[in-house]
């Protein structure tokens, strides 16, 4: 898989299972087997996956605490015509996982970045929620700081779209409580340990979901989808309806949409 001396190598961003080791693509396995080096978040965690598929490769640790010098070493390796497969502990690198900095550096150095798609917790949760067909907002991990968390709530939970985020077991109830206080008792999905042995999904309004959570043990990794509050959905729908009305009226009358708006919605 090594390139010629004058041709830079390629950085393969490889998605790996978020739980079940069978959730890996043939292409991902082939890429890992043929790469010159595998950069991974934690070598011990990655060895479990690699050993399962009998993949023997040089591993180098690269995570969110890695220095710029470490990233520069990987770029230099790529510039020598070698190919690197980059993986994280689980899921798709660069989605609420380390890796974005390395990818940006590769682009800046004219190194080809190749996505090897596969598992992602956000995509898995959205696909079984049944409420995101018109789009959604993804926030990654909610901030630990209360003020930053509340700022996100005030900024992104008013769009009229479902909002998806990751949350730790320690902060899950506090975050749901903050949402209840800010946007009301709207519908929510809480997915625990997706694709793993103790996978579980809970749905309902926030009060009911919090009550169910308190009845069990809160541990593991959580993906949360908050449905847009009904009032926000109506507000968004009315905006879309008004826009359609303006466009239709302008087409029929020959007036501009601004002129139509003044005639229909501006008080005399």
Image (cartoon, rainbow, N blue to C red):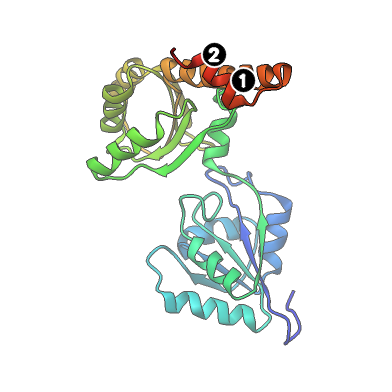
* Viewer-proximal residue among 263 and 100: 263
Q: Quadrant of the N terminus?
A: bottom right
Q: Residue furthest bottom?
A: 5
Residue 266 tag number: none
Q: Is residue 41 above or below residue 91?
A: below
Q: Residue furthest left?
A: 146
Horizontally, residue 170 falls left or right of residue 14, namely: left
The answer to which quarter of the image holds residue 170 is top left
Q: Residue at x 56, y 77 (%)?
A: 75
* Viewer-proximal residue among 78 and 148: 148
Horizontally, residue 91 falls left or right of residue 219, namely: right
Q: Residue at x 27, y 26 (%)?
A: 177
Q: Nearer the viewer, mark 2 or mark 1?
A: 2
Residue 264 tag number: 2
* Viewer-proximal residue among 95 and 214: 95
Q: Position of residue 47 (x, y in %)?
A: 53, 61
Which mark sits nearer the N-terminus, 2 or 1? Answer: 1
Q: Position of residue 13 (x, y in %)?
A: 61, 60
The residue under label 1 is: 246
- The crowding category of the residue bearing disc 2, from other C-alpha atoms within 10 Å (few below 14, some 14 to 19, many at least 20), is few
Query: Disc 2 to disc 1, how far (Cα)?
Result: 9 Å
Q: Quadrant of the C terminus?
A: top left
Q: Is residue 34 above or below residue 97?
A: below
Q: Residue at x 34, y 15 (%)?
A: 208
* Viewer-proximal residue among 169 and 249: 249
Q: Is residue 65 above or below residue 233?
A: below
**SS of the residue under disc 2:** helix
Q: Position of residue 89 (x, y in %)?
A: 49, 55
User: Is the C-beta separation of discs 2 and 1 under 8 Å?
Assistant: yes
Q: Position of residue 77 (x, y in %)?
A: 59, 81
**SS of the residue under disc 1:** helix
């Amino acid at each position: 898989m090594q390139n010629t001396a004058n041709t830079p190598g390629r950085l393969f961003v490889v998605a790996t299972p978020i739980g079940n080791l069978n959730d890996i693509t043939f292409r991902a396995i082939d890429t890992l087997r043929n790469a010159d080096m595998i950069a991974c978040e934690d070598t011990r965690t990655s060895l479990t996956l690699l050993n399962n598929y009998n993949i023997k490769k040089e591993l180098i640790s690269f995570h969110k605490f890695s220095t710029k010098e470490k990233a520069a070493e990987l770029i230099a390796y790529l510039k020598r015509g070698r190919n690197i497969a980059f993986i994280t502990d689980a899921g798709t690198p660069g989605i609420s996982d380390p890796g974005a900095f390395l990818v940006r550096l590769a682009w800046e150095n004219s190194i080809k970045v190749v996505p090897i798609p596969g598992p992602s917790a956000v995509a898995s949760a959205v696909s079984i929620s049944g409420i995101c067909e018109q789009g959604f907002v993804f926030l990654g991990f909610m901030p630990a700081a209360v003020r930053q968390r509340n700022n996100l709530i005030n900024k992104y939970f008013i769009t009229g779209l479902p909002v998806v985020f990751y949350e730790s077991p320690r902060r899950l109830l506090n975050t749901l409580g903050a949402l209840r206080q800010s946007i009301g008792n709207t519908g929510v999905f809480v997915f625990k340990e997706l694709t793993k042995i103790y996978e579980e999904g809970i749905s309902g309004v926030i009060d009911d979901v919090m009550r169910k959570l308190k009845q069990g043990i809160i541990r593991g990794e959580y993906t949360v989808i908050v449905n847009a509050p009904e009032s926000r959905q109506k507000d968004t729908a009315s905006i879309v309806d008004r826009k359609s009305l303006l466009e239709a009226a302008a087409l029929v009358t020959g007036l501009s949409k601004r002129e139509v708006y003044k005639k229909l919605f501006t008080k005399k």
